[in-house]
Image (cartoon, rainbow, N blue to C red):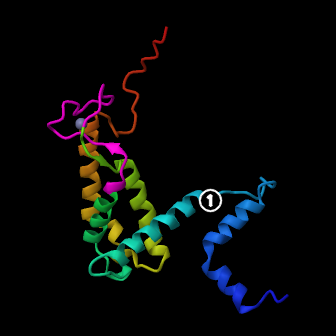
């Protein structure tokens, strides 16, 4: 056995996914070692792969280094087809109802919270993969504005508030 063989070096170097799976599989009986930053890291890696795949399938195909905020917005609207969050349109009778009493034909979208978290992970992944912070397309103004727009729109359409919960009145009258 040669632990320094080129093959094992290559595998360790490239195949992070397998490493993670092997590590978590073998550490099931040692909770002291099983610190799990891997859930976020794993999600971030999957998001990054999805984004890179999106760029490859783009017409014309794009390199990450050519990517702009406009491409990020394209990616976000592309993801909407996989969304599971009902966003009522203005003409829907359930517009603004958090719990509609019936179904409607309004489109399903990606929830604002998912998109917001996704952009955060991709923004970090971009720089971890060698991108410069100054050219990070996930941090541009257009993307921030888009997310704010989605938040306002979904908040109104779904009748829920995304503001952080404030205790306006300490109304603990539960009797
Ligand atoms: Zn509706």
In terms of secondary structure, where does tag 1 sit? loop
Characterize the local packing of mark 1: few (<14), some (14-19) or many (20 or more) Cα atoms within 10 angstroms. Answer: few
Q: Position of residue 9 (x, y in %)?
A: 69, 86
Residue 80 sits above or below residue 106 on the image: below
Q: Nearer the viewer, residue 153 or 11?
A: 11
Q: Is residue 1 left or right of residue 69?
A: right
Q: Is residue 108 left or right of residue 32?
A: left
Q: Nearer the viewer, residue 171 or 29?
A: 29
Q: Is residue 72 magenta?
A: no
Residue with the most extreme right position: 1
Circle 1 residue: 37
Residue 162 sits above or below residue 170 on the image: below
Picture quarter with ligand 1? top left
Residue 141 sits above or below residue 106 on the image: below
Q: Is residue 55 left or right of residue 26?
A: left
Q: Position of residue 95 (x, y in %)?
A: 21, 34
Q: Residue at the spot x=26%, y=64% of the render?
A: 141
Q: Residue at the spot x=32%, y=31% of the render?
A: 98
Q: Residue at the spot x=66%, y=57% of the render?
A: 36
Residue 67 sits above or below residue 50 on the image: below
Q: Position of residue 92 (x, y in %)?
A: 18, 35
Residue with the most extreme bottom position: 6
**Segment tinted magenta in the rendering:** 80-104
- Image quadrant where residue 81 sits: bottom left
Q: Residue at the spot x=24%, y=32% of the render?
A: 96
* Secondary structure character of the magenta stretch overall: loop
Q: Is residue 84 magenta?
A: yes
Q: Nearer the viewer, residue 131 or 159?
A: 159
Q: Position of residue 170 (x, y in %)?
A: 43, 20
């Amino acid at each position: 056995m040669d632990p320094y063989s080129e093959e094992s070096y290559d595998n360790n170097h490239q195949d992070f996914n397998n490493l993670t799976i092997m590590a978590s599989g073998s550490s099931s009986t040692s909770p002291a070692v099983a610190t799990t930053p891997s859930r976020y890291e794993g999600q971030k890696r999957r998001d990054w792969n999805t984004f890179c795949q999106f760029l490859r399938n783009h017409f014309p195909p794009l390199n990450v280094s050519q990517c702009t905020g406009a491409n990020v917005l394209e990616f976000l609207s592309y993801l909407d087809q996989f969304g599971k969050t009902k966003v009522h349109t203005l003409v829907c009778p359930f517009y603004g109802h958090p719990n509609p009493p019936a179904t409607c034909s309004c489109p399903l979208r990606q929830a604002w919270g998912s998109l917001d978290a996704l952009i955060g992970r991709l923004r970090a992944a971009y720089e971890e993969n060698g991108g410069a912070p100054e050219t990070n397309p996930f941090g541009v103004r257009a993307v921030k504005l888009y997310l704010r727009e989605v938040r306002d729109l979904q908040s109104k359409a779904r009748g829920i508030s995304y503001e952080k919960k404030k205790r306006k009145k300490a109304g603990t009258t539960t009797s």
